[in-house]
Structure formats: C-alpha cells, structure tokens
Image (cartoon, grey):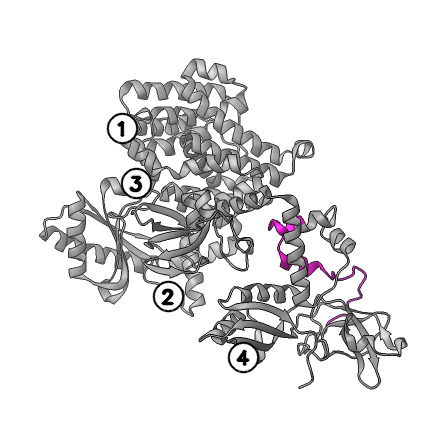
C-alpha cells in the first residue's frame, strides 16, 4: 500500500474510533493497528492491494458500529496468527487474553475454510463440503460462547464479498452461496440489517448475474421518479409532525436489490408487473421518545389513510433479535401505498446494527442481564452441540430453527417462544422441554383444540396437553408427508428417543410397518434384494431403521422394484402425452409392439410387472402377482417388460374403511387433491347397524411412491381405520 493509501485508510479508522472511545482506549487501538501493519508488511491480496487493507476495512466497519475496544483490536489482528506466524502466547502477552481468544476463534474458522480449498489437504482430511460444514458448526458454537467472534467474521465476510471480483468464478459462486445460506440469515437473526442487505446484494450479484443486472436496470429506470415521490412524501408529513410538537428526523429509503428481486418474484406469481410496485418506498420517522412514537403514528394516520391489516407494534412486542419499531402502511400522495416505520434513535441503532449496537452504550465487560436474556437463543446452539453428533444434522437444525423466518407464540403464562415459520404445536412442546414433547397428546391454540400438525402463527397462545402415562412420541411425527415437525431440534429429539428403545422392539415395529405397507400396496419383495438396494447390512438393520424413522416407508416402497440398469429406453418423440393405454413401457427384446395397462390388476409405476402377448392388441402389462395372468396356460405369450421414462399417471383402486360421519367424504377428497392426485370415481357404502363405512375410489397417481404417501395422509383423517389397494379393477 502506498503512503497516501495507508494514510487515508488509517485516518478513517482512527477518526471513527476517536469519536466514541476514551483517549487511552483509542491509543490501544492505535497500538494494535501498528502491530498489524508491521506483521502484514509486504503481503498482497489477490487484487494486488496491500493485505493490511483487509483487516483495516474489517475493523473500520465495526468501529462505525461503535464496538468495544477489544473487538476492534481483534478485528485488526484477526489474520496475524494464520498469515504471519504470530503465536497465541505472543498475542496474549501483547494485547491480553480476551483479544487473543477472539483472534484465535476467528483463526480456527479460517483454517477450516482453507482446508476445504486446498486440494492436497482435501484427500487427507475430508471432502470440501464436509469440511465447510464442520467450519460453520465451529463458527456457530464460537458465536454462542462469545458473539463478538461472529461480529468480526461478518465484517470480514462483508469486505471479502465487496472484493470478490478478483477470485475465479467457481470460488465466487461457492462463497456467495454460503453467504446467502448462512451469513446473511445470521446477520438477520442478530438484528444487523445493514450488513444483511449488503451481503445479500453482493451474493445476488455473483449467483444470479443476469437477474442482478435486470433488477438494477429496472430500479435505476424508476429511481428519479421514486426519489421525487419520496421527497414529496417526506415534506408532506414533516409539517404535521412539527405542528404536533414532535421533533423527529424523517427520511425515505428504497428497498435493496435482492429484496426487490424477491418481491418482484411474488408480484409475477400474482400477475403484476414491476411498474405496479409502489411500496418499494418506505419512510422512516426517528422520534425522541417512545411516547413521541405513538403521537407520530396518530399524526401519520390522520394525514394518510392506513391500509387495513397492515400495522405492527414491535415496540410493545419486540422481535427476538431486539428489533423495535412501529410499522404501518398508508395511502400516501397519489393514493400509492407507503410503508412508514416509527422508532427512537436507540431503536434505530438496534434496527441497523442489531446485537452490535449494545456496545454503543456499554463496553463489553459491562454486559447487562437484559442483553443476556435477549440473546438466550444463542445458548440453544451450545445445547445442540452436545445433543447432535453429525455436522450436517447440526447445521440443518440451525438452518431451520435459527436462520429461517420466525413466528412468536406464547405460553399460557405469557412467555414468548420463537419458532421457525410453519412450526407446529409439537415443535412448540419440544422447545419448552424434551419430556413435554415426548408425551404430547393434544394442543389448545387460542382456546380451541387444534390438530398437532397445524402451523402456528404470530401471537398464538399455545397450551400443550400431556399424556398421564409416559408413552413417548409417535412415529408418525417423523413422516415428512404428515408435517408434524418443522424444527430440526425436535426432529433430532424424536429420532434419539426411538434410538434408545429396545432394538428388537424397533425391528418388530419396522417389520410391522413394512408388512402393512406391502399389504395395502399389493406388493411382494425379496429380503436380500431390498436390503442390497438400500445398502443395509441385514434385513434386521433395515427394519430397525424403518422402526426408528431413519428411513421412511415411502422410500422403501419406491425401492421395492428398482428399474434395471440395462433397460432400453426408446427415443421419445414430443407430442401427445401417453395415456394409461399407451404408457411408457418397454418390451424387452422387441420393438414396434403396442402396450396397454391391464385393467384386471392395474399396475402402477414401481410395481413388478410382466407382459402378455394378445392377438391384435399388442402386449398387455400385468402385475407379476396378477391372479388372471397366473391362470393362463399359454406361457409362450409371456413377455418381459420394464417401465420406461414416460411421465404419466396410472389408475389405482383404493378402499377406505372408516367410521361414518358428517364431512368424511369431504375430508378424503381434500387430502387427495392436496397431493395433486386426480379422482376418477368415488362410491361409498354404509352399514347402518355399525355405522361403518367403506369408501371405494379410483385415483390416478404417478407411481408407488406417491401412492404410499397418499395412504399415509389418508390414514390421519379422523375416523379412518384402514386404507388399502384393491388388487382387481373391473372393466367399466
């Protein structure tokens, strides 16, 4: 770096530090800066610039957020252990234990990242993906121990994203994907919206360059019009606020590129165009006190008509990431919708910087209990570290439970619990206590008895009904088709419960499940073949996995008749899609023969099948266990056939045994339609003496896997005792 360049970046950092730190602490930062400059002397980045520019940029971003002295020093020194050979002891002796620990935490994360990219080391240690997963797990655990490690890491990642153009394209895409999947959601969870949108926009630029350029052009094309409109709206509201005695800063902003892209995607699905999006504009009112915020809200609503259902009070009910603000949507000048956010200066600092804003008011060694309470979710990361063994499973848990959009629900005592969007009462129970989750038998949401797989909404009050006798979780909860569990932590706890049970009990449970599934699907199997195809050591090992929910019954059903590797697949000419009379079937060793599905047994994709040569009608395809085919005497007409690759649907006759009640048929048809399955016919017969009901229906499915999933959903309908596939369907 040239003297001029060094002087410019150094002055910027010291200017920022001197604005909020006492002289002695600013001097300590200066000492760390000198140490880092000397340590990195002569080192270059891929861009060709002096390496010291990177730690200075990292520290400057944190100084602008008014982070404590220790964090700024650690940011300046975060690369000296790895890149300059400085030991932990040397750093500890020079700057103290706390700084050395922060630098060590960031260094360990960097080393794991480097391993994943070093081809010589990959073979010796682990795959790149596995190593990156381990790195992310380590980062999250380090964050739980000291959140400042991740504040440094986020600032470090932001500067790397801002200079990503100097790296090869594959590396750009990998880093950008990781940024969008992990770092941006993490910044959001920590309430750091400023870093969040910058990370998103940079990742968007490299992951979707064509869409990025398109959105940029659209935004720039409308920029002048929006700026004029925003300026007019700001002026229109300032006067009424002043008359009401509210001293407030009012400004406007426009949504960022990635959020605009996501909003445009939603609009396109609704059949709307970019030119119709006027609520890209938001006005911010920064008031002096909480009382002034509510007065300002009244002024805004008296000036502009509020949009019904578009008001949120995050001051009275703050978000889990500490965010506080009043949100309202109004019809502004020209009757166009505007989002208005109203908050105090301190709330605004928290909205922009999140957890980092805490150090604007207190040094790191003066953390208050309220702050610890607000960040209690971090302790879950340490709990999961002890409970979850696999790195991939741990990261999946964090992604679902921490990094996804959250809903906030309440216990009957008024305690708030944050859960990922789509979470159910079962997830809620496990979030309170593991044993409560295991023994959940019912849920009351907002005073009403509710199904356990019902998605919860913001503000719901949830009461869990617990079994009087310890019974353990239901295996159905692990069935993804039934949607009982959304959180990775609850899913892990349920699987762990089943793993702890007697192995033979699990084996028996799995065998019963398999027997039941085969009976209702009308399938046969050979133990050795299914064990081999699913890569298990033994049939008991497979059924144990089935009994503990490690593998789903639909996955097993799909594998019962895998397509042979040597099947000849004819070239498919685009045109009219095949029907059940001309399905994508292959007659082995023959060409030019017509095929049709036998109506006596109606095989579907995934069934074991065989063909029968019929004079004048080509080859009729039957299930191998078809009784009619077995009775045929002319075995010379039997032809080997296999499923091709046509995407079509197949008729299946089902019978449902149930208790007759009002709404039963409606519930059945709703479940079938929710699985995107067509109903060809439906009849029902009732026994008036027993109130039993038999519902017969013919449906069109894509194959065994979809049929298995449909069975699982149908069996959850209240009153349904059994669902099975009828082996014969008569000609209509």
Answer with left or right where residue 676 lies relative to residue 594. left
Over which residues does the magenta segment extend?
544-572
Q: Nearer the viewer, residue 156 or 324?
A: 324
Residue under pointer 3: 350
- Say which residue appears at 66% left-offset and 74% top-offset: 726
Residue under pointer 4: 687
**First in sequence: mark 2 vs mark 3:** 2
Q: Nearer the viewer, residue 442 or 309?
A: 442
In the image, residue 632 lies at what x, y percent? 85, 79
In the image, residue 562 lies in the stretch drawn in magenta? yes
Residue 424 visible in the displayed image = no
* Secondary structure found at label 1: loop
For label 4, count other residues whose C-alpha is less than 10 Å away and answer few (under 14), some (14-19) or many (20+).
few
**First in sequence: mark 1 vs mark 2:** 1
* Secondary structure found at label 2: helix
Contact between marks 1 and 2 (CB within 8 A): the answer is no
Q: Which mark is residue 19?
A: 1
**First in sequence: mark 2 vs mark 4:** 2
In the image, residue 591 lies at what x, y percent? 83, 74
Q: Nearer the viewer, residue 645 or 111?
A: 645
Contact between marks 1 and 3 (CB within 8 A): the answer is no
Q: Which mark is residue 275?
A: 2
In space, the residues marked 3 and 4 are separated at their CA atoms by: 66 Å
In space, the residues marked 1 and 3 are separated at their CA atoms by: 19 Å
Answer with left or right where residue 339 lies relative to residue 384. left
**First in sequence: mark 1 vs mark 3:** 1
| Depicted 472 relative to depicted 1: above or below | below
Q: Nearer the viewer, residue 503 or 328?
A: 503
For the residues carrying marks 1 and 3, which lies nearer the camera in this image? 3
In space, the residues marked 2 and 3 are separated at their CA atoms by: 33 Å
Contact between marks 2 and 4 (CB within 8 A): the answer is no
In space, the residues marked 2 and 4 are separated at their CA atoms by: 61 Å
């Amino acid at each position: 770096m040239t003297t001029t360049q060094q002087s410019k970046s150094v002055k910027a950092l010291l200017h920022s530090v001197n604005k909020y730190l006492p002289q002695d602490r600013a001097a300590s930062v200066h000492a760390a800066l000198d140490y880092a400059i000397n340590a990195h002397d002569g080192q270059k980045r891929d861009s060709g610039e002096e390496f010291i520019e990177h730690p200075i940029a990292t520290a400057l971003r944190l100084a602008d957020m008014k982070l404590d002295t220790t964090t700024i020093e650690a940011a300046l020194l975060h690369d000296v252990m790895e890149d300059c050979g400085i030991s932990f002891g040397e750093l500890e002796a020079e700057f103290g234990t706390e700084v050395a620990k922060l630098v060590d935490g960031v260094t360990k994360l960097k080393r794991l990242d480097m391993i994943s990219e070093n081809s010589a080391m990959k073979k010796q240690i682990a795959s790149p993906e596995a190593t990156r997963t381990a790195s992310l797990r380590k980062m999250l655990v380090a964050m739980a121990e000291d959140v400042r490690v991740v504040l440094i890491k986020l600032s470090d990642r932001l500067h790397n994203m801002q200079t990503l153009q100097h790296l090869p394209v594959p590396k750009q895409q990998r880093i950008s994907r990781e940024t969008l999947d992990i770092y941006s959601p993490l910044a959001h969870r920590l309430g750091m919206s400023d870093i969040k949108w910058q990370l998103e926009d940079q990742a968007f630029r490299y992951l979707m360059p064509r869409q990025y350029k398109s959105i940029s052009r659209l935004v720039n094309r409308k920029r002048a019009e929006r700026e004029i409109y925003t300026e007019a709206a700001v002026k229109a509201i300032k006067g009424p606020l002043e008359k009401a005695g509210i001293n407030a800063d009012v400004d406007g902003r426009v949504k960022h590129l990635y959020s605009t892209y996501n909003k445009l995607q939603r609009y396109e699905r609704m059949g709307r165009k970019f030119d119709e999006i006027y609520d890209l504009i938001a006005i911010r009112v920064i008031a002096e006190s909480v009382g002034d915020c509510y007065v300002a809200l009244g002024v805004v609503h008296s000036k502009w008509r509020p949009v019904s259902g578009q008001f949120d009070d995050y001051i009275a009910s703050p978000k889990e990431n500490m965010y506080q603000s009043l949100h309202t949507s109004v019809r502004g000048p020209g009757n166009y919708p505007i989002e208005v956010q109203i908050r105090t200066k301190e709330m605004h600092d928290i909205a922009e910087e999140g957890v980092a804003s805490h150090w604007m008011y207190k040094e790191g060694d003066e953390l208050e209990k309220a702050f610890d309470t607000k960040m209690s979710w971090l302790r879950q990361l340490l709990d999961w570290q002890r409970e979850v063994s696999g790195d991939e499973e741990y990261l999946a848990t964090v992604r679902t439970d921490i990094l996804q959009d959250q809903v906030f629900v309440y216990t009957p005592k008024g305690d708030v619990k944050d859960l990922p969007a789509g979470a159910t009462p079962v997830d809620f129970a496990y979030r309170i206590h593991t044993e409560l989750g295991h023994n959940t038998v019912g849920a009351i949401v907002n005073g009403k008895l509710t199904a356990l797989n019902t998605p919860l909404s913001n503000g719901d009050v949830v009461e869990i009904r617990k079994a009087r006798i310890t019974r353990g979780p239901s295996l159905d909860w692990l069935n993804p088709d039934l949607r009982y569990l959304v959180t990775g932590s609850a899913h892990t706890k349920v699987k762990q419960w089943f793993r702890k049970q007697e192995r033979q009990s699990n084996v028996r449970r799995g065998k019963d499940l398999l027997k039941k599934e085969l009976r209702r699907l009308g399938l046969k199997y050979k133990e050795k073949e299914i064990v081999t195809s699913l890569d298990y050591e033994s049939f008991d090992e497979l059924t144990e996995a089935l009994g503990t929910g490690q593998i789903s019954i639909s996955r097993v059903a799909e594998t019962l008749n895998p397509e042979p590797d040597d099947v000849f697949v004819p070239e498919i000419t685009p045109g009219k899609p095949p029907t059940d009379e001309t399905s994508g079937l292959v007659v082995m060793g023959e060409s030019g023969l017509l095929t049709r599905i036998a109506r006596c047994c109606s095989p579907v994709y995934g069934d074991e099948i065989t063909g029968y040569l019929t004079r004048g009608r080509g080859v009729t395809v039957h299930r191998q266990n078809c009784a009619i085919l077995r009775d045929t005497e002319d075995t010379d007409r039997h032809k080997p056939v296999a499923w091709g690759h046509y995407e079509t649907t197949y008729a299946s006759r089902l019978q449902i045994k149930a208790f007759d009640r009002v709404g039963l048929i409606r519930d059945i048809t709703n479940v079938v339609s929710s699985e995107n399955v067509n109903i060809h016919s439906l009849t029902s017969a009732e026994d008036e003496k027993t109130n039993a009901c038999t519902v017969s229906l013919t449906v069109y499915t894509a194959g065994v896997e979809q049929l298995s999933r449909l069975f699982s959903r149908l069996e959850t309908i209240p009153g349904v005792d059994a669902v099975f596939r009828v082996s014969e369907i008569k000609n209509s």
